[in-house]
Every structure is written in structure tokens, then in C-alpha cells.
Image (spheres, rainbow, N blue to C red):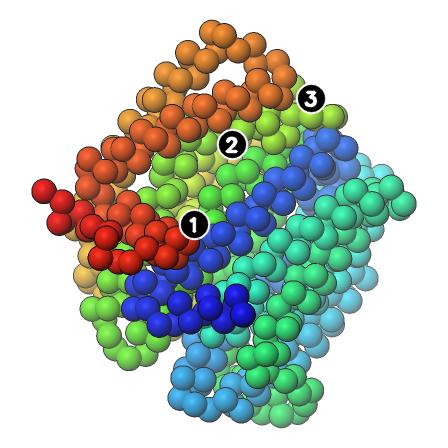
Amino acid sequence: MIQKILNNKILNGSPVQSVAGAALIISLAGIASRLLGLLRDRILASQFGAGDTLDIYYAAFRIPDLVYSLLVVGALSAAFIPVFTGIFTRGEKEKAWELASGIINLGVLVIVIISFFLALFAPLVMKLVVPGFSETKLESTVMFTRIMFLSPLFLGISAVFGGMLVSFKRFLAYSLAPSMYNLGIIIGAVFFVEIMGPIGLAWGVVLGAGMHMLIQYPAVRLSGFFHKFNLKKSLKSKSVRRVIRLMIPRSLGMAVTQINMLVITIFASTLASGSLTVFNFANNIQSVPLGLFGISFAVAAFPHLSSLADEKSRKEFVRIFSRTFRRIIFFVIPLSVFIFILRAEITRVILGTGKFDWEDTVLTLQVLGILSISLFAQSLIPLLARTFYALQNTKTPFYIALVSETINIFIVILLIKKFEVLGLAIAFSAANLANMFLLIAMLKRKISHIDGKNIICSTSKIVLASLAAGITIQATRYLTSNFVNLETFLEVFFQLTISGGMGAATFLLMCYYLRIEEFYDFKKSILIKIFGYPTDVIKDPNEIK
């Protein structure tokens, strides 16, 4: 019943309202997932600290993640959703179900074959991925990796389920899946480790992947989908072949993204023990707003952009792109400022416990500060890339990703000797900034008008409001440090909450006085979607005298 109500609200609104409502649902579910993710990291940090065990754990993700990204994410984000949506909107339901079944059939077959051979040759593969690991550390990484190869199978099926749900704009079950994934990892860290030792972490990942798949199946089944295993028919299907053709450039683009993490893993393995863990912890923290706003808005906008591109409704296409772009900026820029200024408090509150010592904390907060500088770029890339995919252009984002990865590798080689793990963070941020600016430039060339005037105007106001909030945060930190010792969790949490709260209040006040359109959109979404306020009591900023 809840899902039906939520879907009706989304489907009955205008396209822009639908994007906001869908993004709100994804964001609310995402909050739960991200909180579980932070709890997961706190448990891992407390139990193991930044050392060999977590270096092994994070290194073991690299190849299974590469398989998943190459074979699944590319197909879903660039090809499956637009093709499936197009078939379904034409009323050809049976063909749509055949396409979904065909992608699942081929996907499972290919994943099983590739994973089998990679697991078989894991000792050779992982020696290339972590050349700096000792023999003992390498052996453990191989063992973790072989177990984790089960996860792409579950996540692959789950991704097809999720693609169908996004096409139907049924975002609730889709949005809950990441929470299940994190819950599985937490179960592994808390219970499996007690029984099996550190290898329980790998089995927790497999459990999480299975839960990620199972949570979405009932919603897909209720939508009318019934899986048919017919491999011969799948291979002959024109729509399946079309998805494969479209996914190849996108898969290569995803490979470049994963190569980015592979490069970080390779170089981090040559640094001091715990360097890879520190980078991953910092990246996980700054990924919270990325997931909540950058990815959620991009996912919510994608089916609308895809349908409008097919209908040649360029004006409405640009309008939705611009509004979504500005909404991402509205949330992410102030959060970037908050994270940068409060990076010490955030790191201490989330990770500063158990075996995660002061040296680990300092290094993590330094990496977090560098990563936060490019957070707005990281958050816009999913939308920009999906805008190209909606136009059925998968090559441009791939070429741009290739250029940005070249920049990443060059800067890493240049800086790693002097700055060590901080050099990895600098290279990562620089590459993402380059990726974003190149995507914007190429998109402007492709569709000429992308509503740049409104984007620049809103962004300027948001930056001004964020800077004012940052000054308030810094002043509040200074004042509270005079009467708070900052030696216990509660004292640090108090400073974080008070400083962050004052900063948020300042930002919202500045948004009101600067008449930032996205602020009023946000206010309207909250009042309508949560509290049920009628639209006529919510004033537009342009109506305020």
C-alpha cells in the first residue's frame, strides 16, 4: 500500500515534480543505507583499525567490483533502462519481459564463466593488483577475493530488478536494497568474524549481495515480471542485442572508473600498512552526500530524460536537466564546505574508537579534506553521464573518463613519493574535476543550450550562502572549543552538532534572503511530500516582494 501511494504520487506529478519526489524517496531510503554504511565502517575501524586486515578486505573488492561494473552496471545505466522503458511505454509488455529475462540469462552465464576463471587465477591477478603486499597478506587477499566473486552474481540479477523498478518509477524497493547490502556486511563483521575469523568479512559481503537481490524481487514480481530461462531465444532477441551494442562503450567507461580504484589500490599497496584502508574510509565518508544527492537525483531523472529524448522534447529535456543539476549543487556544495571544515570532528565521531588510533584518525581526516574539494564534481558526474546515455550517446562519457583517468595516473606518479596516500587523494580529486568540466563542455557542444545562465546564477548564490555558513561553522567551533575539552565522544559530537547546526541555519537563512529557487523547491517538496501541505500556501521566491 505504501509503495502504491508513493508511486501514484510520483507518476501523477509533472516530470520535474516527479524527479523531486523520486529523489526524495531515494534520498530518505539512502539516509538509512548511508547511516548503516557509517555504522559498518565504525565497526570495522573499531575491530581492526587501519591495518593489514582491512587492507586485504578492501583490496579483495577490486576485481569482483570490476566484473560487476563491466558486465552489469554498463548494461543497466546506459542501455537496459532506455530500451526497456521504450518497449514498455509502447505497450509491448511481453517483449519487455523477454528483454529482462534475456539480460538476466546472458548476464548470469557470462558472470559465472568470467568469475570462475578469475577465481582460478586469482593468485596471479591479485599479485598485479597489490604488488606491495607481502606473501602472507597476498594469500589472504586471494582467499577473500575468491569468496567475494559470488557477490557479482547476486548483484547482477539485482541490478536488472532495479533497472525494471526504476523504469516503472517504483523507487521504494529499489532504494532499500543498498541498506540490505550494508546490513549483510555488518552481520558478517559482528557475527561471522566471531565464528570464522577475518574471512567472515568476505562472507558478509556475499550475504549482503544476496539480500540486495531478494529485497527487490517481490516488487518486480508484483509488477508482472516472470523470469523465463531460454538462452537460445535470448541470444536471438533483437532488443537484447541492442542493449549489448549500447552497453559496450558504457562498460568500457565503467572499466575506466574501476581502473581508477585499481590504480589507487596498486599504489596504496606499496605504502605503509593501512594506507588503502585510510583512503577507503575517507572516501566512504565523503560518498554519503554523493549517494544521497548526486546519485539519487541522477537515478530519479534518468527515466524522464530518456523518455523526453525519445520524444524529441528538447526544451523540456533541458529544463529537467537544469533543475536536477541545480538541486544537486544546492545540497552538495554546502555539505562539501561542512565536511571540509568539520573533517576532524566527523572522522573522530565516525571512526575514532577501538583499534582506530590517533595517527589513523589524523591521516583519514587529511584525506577526507582533499576529497571533499571535488565532492561537487563527483556528485554531478552521474547526472552528466546519464544525460548522454539518455541521448543514447555512450561513447563521449567513455572518452572523457579515459582522459580523466590518464590525468589521475599521471598525478599519482608525480606525487605519491612525496605525499604518499595524500597524493592519491589529490590525484582522485583532480581527475574528477577534469571529468566533470569536460562532460559539461561536451554536453554544451551537443545540445548547445543547457540553461547555463540559470545554472551559473543559482550556483553563485549557493556558493555565497555556503561560504557564509562556513564562516559561522568556524566561528562556532572556535567558541565551543573554549569550554569543551574535546576528549570524549560526547564532547566531539556536541561540537560537531552545534557547529553543523549553526552552519545549516546560516545557510538556510542566506538561501531565503538570496531567494535561491532550489531552496523554495526543497521547502515545497518537504511540505507536500511529507506534511501534505497544499501547493497554494507555498510561495514561489519570485512572488515574494
x 60%, y 56%: residue: 178
Mark 2 vs 3, N-terminal side: 3
Amino acid type, label 1: Phe
> What element does badge 1 sit on?
helix
x 70%, y 77%: residue: 109
The reply to whether callout 1 and callout 2 are in contact (CB within 8 Å) is: no
> What element does badge 3 sit on?
loop
Instruction: Find residue 479 and report its image quarter.
Output: top left
Residue at the outermost left position: 545
Amino acid type, label 3: Asp
Residue at the outermost top position: 482
User: Where is residue 252 drawn, in percent x and y?
Assistant: 51, 63
Mark 3 vs 1, N-terminal side: 1
On the picture, is 368 further left or further right than 50? left
Residue bearing the label numbered 1: 293
Most foreground residue, 142 or 166: 166
Label 2 Cα crowd, 10 Å radius (few <14 / some 14-19 / many 20+)? many
User: Where is residue 465 drawn, in percent x and y?
Assistant: 27, 33
User: Where is residue 224 drawn, in percent x and y?
Assistant: 57, 84
Mark 1 vs 2, N-terminal side: 1
Label 3 Cα crowd, 10 Å radius (few <14 / some 14-19 / many 20+)? some
> What element does badge 2 sit on?
helix
The mark lying in front, picked from 1 and 2, is 1
Residue bearing the label numbered 2: 368
| Residue 357: mark | 3
x 23%, y 48%: residue: 517
Q: Quadrant of the C terminus?
A: top left
Residue at the outermost right position: 195
Amino acid type, label 2: Leu
On the picture, is 12 further left or further right than 425? left
